[in-house]
Amino acid sequence: MVDARQSVGTTASPLRIGLVGIGKIARDQHLPSIADIPEISLRAAASRSMPAGDPLIRYPTLQAMLEGEPDLDAVSLCTPPQGRFDQAMLALAAGKHLMIEKPPGATVREVELLAEEADRRGVTLFATWHSREAAGVATAREWLADKAIHRVSIRWKEDIRVWHPGQDWILEPGGLGVFDPGINALSILTRILPQPVRVEAARLYFPANRFAPIAARLALRSGDTPVDADFDFLQTGPQSWDMMVTTDAGDLTLSMGGSVLRIGDGAEQHAPDHEYRRLYRRFAELVHTGASDVDLSPIKLVADAFLLGERRSAEPFEF
Ligand code: NAP
């Protein structure tokens, strides 16, 4: 007998998917990427603010979408991390394969429980790290595999008012504050370095009127290699999403969030942004092969920075 999941997620039989949370990232990336790849077929979307007459957004909640679209194979959650656990459990309980945005949860434990639940129900859970799909990351990982790595420096500095206007959830408990972008750097770091990474020290800057840090400095270590990270959410002017790796064979630099790679004195390597197309292709492949992909290492580093970090006060913050 052919396992039913073996037939979906292919060009011939696309994965029928429902999207939840039609906000910034759903509109900027999920919708156009799904439309571009034949392995995924978008059937419906659920949004608390249902725009009248929208052919796609026909449900106010995930529950209503699951009831109205019993043929869905999978659900993709594009909502903020707080509250996503209950949505994820609902989708898994309905027997749906599940893809979730980064960070995969508001706590580490809830993501472990989701992975156990997916396993128990025999469905796929894909906890995505979109920055790992940036154009330069795979080559960086391959190049670094046999190098002696002396040091890594990360500068992840962006303007919260430009990139996350009005997104109060980011500065609420569980929103991670500056680690919302910073965890992208940590997801790349943990992908490209051959040795596991751990936090040695951290300093977190909390605005007096908010619950999550607006800046952070981390000292990490990977084997013998020191890694320093500087995360800032108040960067005006030029923005930086850069990582420099110093090795016995010269420097490797990933910039623009991993999309631009430079090795030694070589030319910068640029490639188009296909992060979310790659994520959805990978999701289809995971479903097709009956696997899950849940790597908690980036969120564990963030949790450890909160556990170990010195807390400092910063100016009150308003958008
Ligand atoms: P967002 O626009 O503020 O929120 C996404 C959508 O989630 C909202 O439009 C809303 O959709 C739903 N939502 C918001 N608060 C909710 C709540 N309390 N309960 C239930 N639904 C809620 O956020 P976003 O920037 O798209 O980010 C969403 C996730 O994607 C986050 O985990 C973020 O880290 C990740 N991400 C964001 C970016 C980025 O550049 N913004 C990039 C990569 C990944 P409805 O009104 O349709 O229900």
Image (cartoon, grey):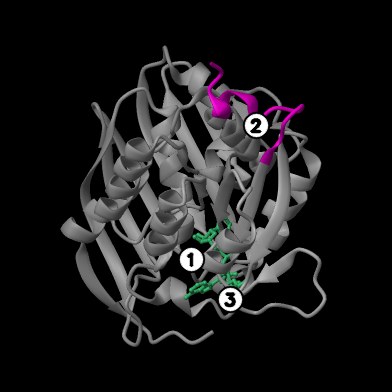
Out of 212 and 19, give the one closest to the viewer.
19
Residue at the image position 21 percent from the left and 70 percent from the top: 311
The numbered mark, 1 or 3, whose residue comes first in the sequence reads 1
Instruction: Please name the residue that numbered disc 2 is placed on.
Output: 9
Picture coordinates of residue 306, whole percent (x, y): 23, 60
**How far apart are the alpha carbons under marks 1 and 2?**
26 Å
Q: Is residue 212 left or right of residue 29?
A: left
Give the residues drawn in magenta, as a range.
1-15
- Tell me the kind of residue under disc 1: Pro
> Mostly what secondary structure, the magenta segment?
loop
Q: Secondary structure at mark 2?
A: loop
> What residue is disc 3 on?
161
Residue 288: image x %, image y %? Answer: 57, 26
Along the line of sight, which residue is nearer the eye, 113 or 240?
Answer: 113
Per the model, the C-alpha gap separating discs 3 and 2 is 38 Å
Element at label 3: helix
Q: Looking at the image, which is closer to me, 172 or 16?
A: 16
Image quadrant in which you'd find residue 36: top right
The percent position of residue 125, horizontal first and vertical second, equals 44, 41
First in sequence, mark 1 or 2: give its number: 2
Q: What is the CA distance from the residue labelled 1 to the residue labelled 3? A: 17 Å
Please say if 40 is above or below 234: above
- What amino acid type is highlighted by mark number 2? Gly
- For label 1, the residue is 80
Task: State if disc 3 and disc 1 touch (CB < 8 Å).
Answer: no
Of tags 1 and 2, which is closer to the observer?
A: 2
Judge whether 278 appears above or below 47 on screen. above
Task: Name the residue: 73% across, 44% down.
Answer: 41
